[in-house]
Image: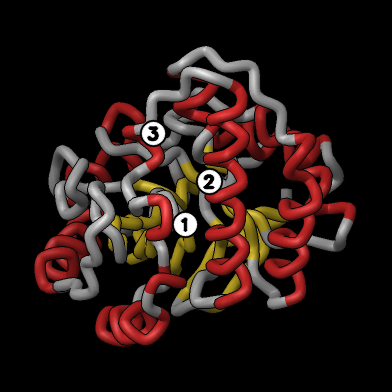
Amino acid sequence: MSGYLTDYHTHSICSPDGTVPIREMARAGKAFGLREMCITDHCDLLDLSGRRTLEFDWTDILAQYRQAKAELEDDRFTLRLGLELGGAHVSPAHAAAILRAGEPDFVIGSVHNKSEALGGGDFYFVQYDSPELCHEMLADYFQSLLAVAELGLYDSLGHIIYPLRYMAMRDGQDVTLEPHLPVLRDILTAVADRGKGIEVNTYRGRTVAEWRETLALYRSIGGEKVTVGSDAHRPEDVGLGMAQSLDLLRELGFRAVTVYRRREPRSIPL
C-alpha cells in the first residue's frame, strides 16, 4: 500500500449538501493519515430541479480554506483548493469565468443532472423502476458527460459511473454498461487526448471494484492520469476507499496517482 494517501474529492458546508466547515473536513483528513487532500465543493450550472444557476461566489470557500490551510498544513499534510464543476457544457462561458474568479488548484468535471431537454433534474431524484429507464437515463447522462469531456475545463472527469449509485445500489436494478461502451470509449478518448485525467470515486468507500471495467478501458486507450476521491460530505467519510483504490490501480498496471497544484499535474508513484 502506498504511503502517500490522497483524497481529491471532498465537500464541506460550502456545498449545498455538506455538513461541516472546511477546517473540520481537513482535520479529519489529517487524522486519517492523508498526505494530501483537496476540498472540491459543488458548483453546478443546473440546480437540483434543473434550473440554470450561472453565478458562483467564492468568498466563503476562500476564507475557510485559507484558515484551514494556515492552521493544519505541515510537512506531512497538504491541503489544496478545488472545485467540482458540474455541467460546464450548459454555459461554457460562465463556467470559465467561475474558474478564473477562484483560481483553484484542481477542478473535477462532472454531470449530476439530466439534459435540459429531459428537464434537467438531478439523476438522484429519478425512481429507477425498470432496466429500460436505466438505459434511457444512462444514454442521456453519457451524452452530457461527453460534452463536458470534450469541453476540457476540468482536470479530472468525476464519478463517471455516477447514476449507477442510484440505479443499482439504491433501487436494485441489475444494470450493465455494455450497451454504452462505445460512448464511454469516446469519453475516455476525449479525456486522454486532452491530457486530462479521470477519477476513481469510492462513494464514501462503497465503490472500488466497480471501477475495474472503466479503468481497464481507459488504460487500453492510453489514459494515464487518475485521481482518487471519497466524495466525503462528512468528516467520518474522508479517506474511505483510498488505499483500496491505489491497490486496484496498481493491479491494473497504472504506475502513479495524480495530484495537482495550480492546475498542473504531478505524478505520485504507486
Where the N terminus falls, by quadrant?
A: top right
N-term mark: 3 or 2: 3
Relative side of 225 to 31, left or right: right
- Give the CA distance from mark 3 to mark 1: 26 Å
**Residue at position x 36%, y 35% in the image:** 124
Task: Answer few, some or many: residues within 10 Å of disc 1's Cα (few below 14, many 20 plus, some between 14 and 19).
Answer: many
Query: In the rendered image of this protein, does residue 168 appear above or below residue 16?
Result: above
Give the x, y percent position of residue 138.
Answer: 58, 41
Q: Nearer the viewer, residue 265 or 27?
A: 265
N-term mark: 1 or 2: 1
Give the x, y percent position of residue 54.
Answer: 23, 73
- Give the CA distance from mark 1 to mark 2: 7 Å
Secondary structure category for the residue under label 3: helix
Q: Amino acid at mark 2?
A: His
Q: Which residue is label 2 attached to?
A: 159
Q: Which residue is label 1 attached to?
A: 110
**Residue at position x 28%, y 56% in the image:** 41
Query: In the rendered image of this protein, does residue 149 appear above or below residue 227?
Result: below
- Give the CA distance from mark 3 to mark 2: 22 Å
Residue contact between numbered discs 1 and 2, judged by CB atoms under 8 Å:
yes
Label ID, residue 32: 3
N-term mark: 3 or 1: 3
